C-alpha cells in the first residue's frame, strides 16, 4: 500500500515547558491521512487545530511522538531538511492569506517557485499565470495584492499554495474572513485541487455546511481527536 501523506503517532505538544505557564495543548494525537483525502478539521476555538496544522506543516515541532510526511520520518531532520521537505511536499493557505503586500498577484504566486529554485525563469511566470487563470484572476494578475478584495486575495493565496504541486495542502480557516459567496468559491477551488491533483487537504473550518462537504471530519476537542 502507498505510504500515507501524513502519519502522526502519539504526538504531544507542550508550550513553555518548564516555565510557570507551561501548558500541554496536544495530548497524544494519532492521525493518518491518505493521498487524496479531503478532511475537514473542526473543533472549538483553542482546542488545538492550528497547533496541529503547524506541526503537520513542519512549522513547529512536536514535544514528543512521531510525524512522517510522505513517508519521511521528521523527528531526526535538521532545519534545512525540514525546510526542503516542507517546500516540496506541503502547500499552505492561512486565514489572513499572508501575501506579500508590496508585490503583485503574479509575484506572490511565483514566490514558492523562486524560493525552491533560487532563480527566476520564464516557466515560473507561465505557471503562475496559468494558476491565476484557474482561480479566475487573470485580469488582476499585475495588480498589487493590496488592491484586491478579501476573496480575491484568498484566491491568490490558493494559487500560490498550488505552485509546487504538493501532495498535501494545509488550509487553516481559509474561508474564516470571507462572505458566504467568496467562501464557496474558495471551497470549490480546494475541491478542484483535491480532485485534479489528488492532493490531501486538511481544511480547518467553523462552517458546518462546508465541513459536511468534505470526505472526512477530524474533530479536535481539548487537544485530542474525537472519533
Ligand atoms: P485553535 O486553532 O483550535 O483555535 P490553537 O492551536 O491556536 O487552537 O491553540 C490551542 C491552545 O494552545 C490555546 O490555549 C492557545 O492559547 C495555546 N497556544 C497556541 N500557541 C501557543 C504558543 N505559541 N505559546 C503558548 N500557548 C499557545
Ligand atoms: Mg486556529
Image (cartoon, helix red, strand yellow):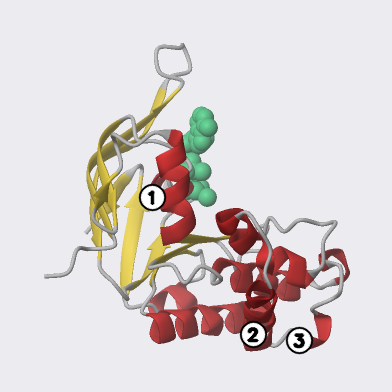
Q: Residue under circle 2?
A: 130
Query: How far apart are labels 3 and 2 at the CA level?
Result: 8 Å
Please name whichever residue, 213 or 54, is drawn nearer the observer in this view of the structure: 54
> Which comes sooner in the sequence, label 1 or label 3?
1
Q: Residue under circle 3?
A: 138
Q: Give the crowd class for mark 3: few <14, some 14-19, many >=20 residues within 10 Å.
A: some
Q: Residue under circle 1?
A: 56
> From what the image shows, is residue 69 above or below residue 148?
above
> Which comes sooner in the sequence, label 1 or label 2?
1
Name the spot of residue 105 as percent of width and height, x first. 77, 71
Q: Residue at x 63, y 76 (%)?
A: 123
**Left of 103 or right of it: where is 182?**
left
Instruction: Using the rendered image of the protein, determine whether residue 100 is visible from the camera's viewpoint.
Output: yes
Image quadrant containing the N terminus: bottom left
Q: Residue 224 has which mark?
A: none
Mark nearer the viewer, 1 or 3: 3
Please name whichever residue, 19 or 137, is drawn nearer the observer in this view of the structure: 137
**Left of 30 or right of it: where is 16?**
right
Amino acid at each position: 500500500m502507498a505510504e500515507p501523506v501524513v502519519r502522526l503517532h502519539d504526538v504531544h505538544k507542550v508550550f513553555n515547558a518548564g516555565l510557570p505557564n507551561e501548558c500541554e495543548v496536544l495530548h497524544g494525537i494519532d492521525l493518518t491521512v491518505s493521498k487524496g483525502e479531503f478532511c475537514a478539521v473542526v473543533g472549538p476555538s483553542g482546542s488545538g487545530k492550528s497547533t496541529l496544522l503547524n506541526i503537520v506543516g513542519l512549522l513547529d515541532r512536536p514535544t514528543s511522538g512521531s510525524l512522517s510526511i510522505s513517508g519521511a520520518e521528521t523527528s531526526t531532520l535538521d532545519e534545512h531538511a525540514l525546510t526542503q521537505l516542507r517546500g516540496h511536499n506541503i502547500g499552505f493557505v492561512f486565514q489572513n492569506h499572508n501575501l506579500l503586500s508590496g508585490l503583485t498577484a503574479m509575484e506572490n504566486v511565483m514566490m514558492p517557485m523562486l524560493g525552491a529554485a533560487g532563480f527566476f525563469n520564464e516557466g515560473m511566470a507561465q505557471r503562475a499565470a496559468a494558476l491565476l487563470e484557474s482561480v479566475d484572476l487573470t485580469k488582476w494578475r499585475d495588480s498589487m495584492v493590496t488592491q484586491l478584495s478579501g476573496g480575491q486575495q484568498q484566491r491568490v493565496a490558493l494559487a500560490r499554495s498550488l505552485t509546487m504541486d504538493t501532495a498535501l495542502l494545509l488550509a487553516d480557516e481559509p474561508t474564516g474572513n470571507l462572505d458566504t459567496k467568496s467562501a464557496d468559491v474558495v471551497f470549490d477551488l480546494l475541491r478542484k485541487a483535491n480532485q485534479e491533483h489528488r492532493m490531501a487537504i486538511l481544511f480547518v473550518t467553523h462552517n458546518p455546511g462546508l465541513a459536511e462537504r468534505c470526505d472526512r471530519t477530524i474533530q479536535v476537542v481539548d487537544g485530542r481527536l474525537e472519533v
